[in-house]
């Protein structure tokens, strides 16, 4: 007998979410925690973290994150945290700042690649940073470029 899950429990990601680990300069998703994020079971993802990742074939997400837990001055800005997490991900660097999560725990707010960050939902990122008491780390706008063609 089939048991239908309520929509809030369905674990999936959007059509804009890249699938599989990107190569160097490849596309990955930028995430913020959703209202169903379980902070108690994901304590490594600290408030204000830059969270990037990709979708897995099983409907989960693999994310890399940077929380600047050692208060490094070069990682004060959110976009620098997201960039560091992205660099770790594309290089396949060993790290404890990595997790496999149910897709309903996170909301995709944009895309990151080797050229920069393009946020489609800057206001959701700002809400996450305000909740984290880190609004001063927010990017100046929806597009942050670190490399041009």
Image: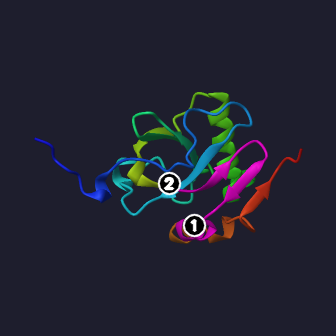
Looking at the picture, the colour scheme in use is: rainbow
Q: In front: 90, or 111?
A: 111
Nearer the observer, disc 2 or disc 1?
A: 1
Whole-percent x, y for residue 101 in the image: 41, 43
Residue with the mark numbered 1? 129
Q: Quadrant of the N terminus?
A: top left
Q: In front: 51, or 59?
A: 59
Q: 57 above or below 46?
A: above
Label 1: state its secondary structure: helix
Q: Quadrant of the C terminus?
A: top right
Q: Is residue 72 visible?
A: no
The Cα–Cα distance between marks 2 and 1, rounded to whole angstroms, is: 11 Å
Q: Residue at x 61, y 50 (%)?
A: 68
Q: Is residue 115 visible?
A: yes
Q: Is residue 103 left or right of residue 92?
A: left
> Which comes before the other along the chain, label 2 or label 1?
2
Whole-percent x, y for residue 147 in the image: 85, 47
Residue 6: image quadrant is bottom left
**Contact? badges 2 and 1 (CB < 8 Å):** no
Disc on res. 21: none
Disc on res. 46: 2
The number of discs equals 2
Q: Residue at x 70, y 56 (%)?
A: 118
Label 2: state its secondary structure: loop
Q: 34 above or below 112?
A: below
Please give the range of residues in magenta.
107-128
Instruction: Kindly give the residue lying farthest to the right in the view shown.
Output: 149
Q: Residue at x 55, y 46 (%)?
A: 17
Whole-percent x, y for residue 76 in the image: 69, 58
Whole-percent x, y for residue 107 in the image: 49, 57
Q: 106 above or below 63?
A: below
Q: Is residue 14 left or right of residue 37?
A: right
């Amino acid at each position: 007998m089939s048991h239908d899950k309520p929509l809030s429990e369905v674990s999936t990601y959007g059509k804009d979410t890249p699938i599989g680990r990107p190569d160097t300069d490849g596309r990955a998703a930028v995430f913020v925690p959703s209202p169903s994020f379980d902070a108690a079971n994901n304590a490594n993802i600290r408030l204000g973290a830059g969270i990037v990742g990709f979708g897995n074939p099983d409907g989960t997400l693999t994310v890399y994150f940077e929380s600047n837990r050692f208060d490094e001055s070069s990682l004060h800005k959110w976009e620098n945290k997201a960039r560091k997490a992205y660099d770790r991900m594309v290089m396949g660097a060993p790290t404890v700042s990595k997790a496999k999560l149910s897709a309903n725990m996170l909301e995709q707010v944009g895309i990151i690649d080797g050229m920069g960050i393009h946020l489609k939902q800057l206001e959701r990122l700002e809400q996450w940073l305000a909740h984290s008491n880190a609004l001063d780390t927010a990017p100046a706008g929806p597009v942050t470029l670190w490399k041009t063609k």
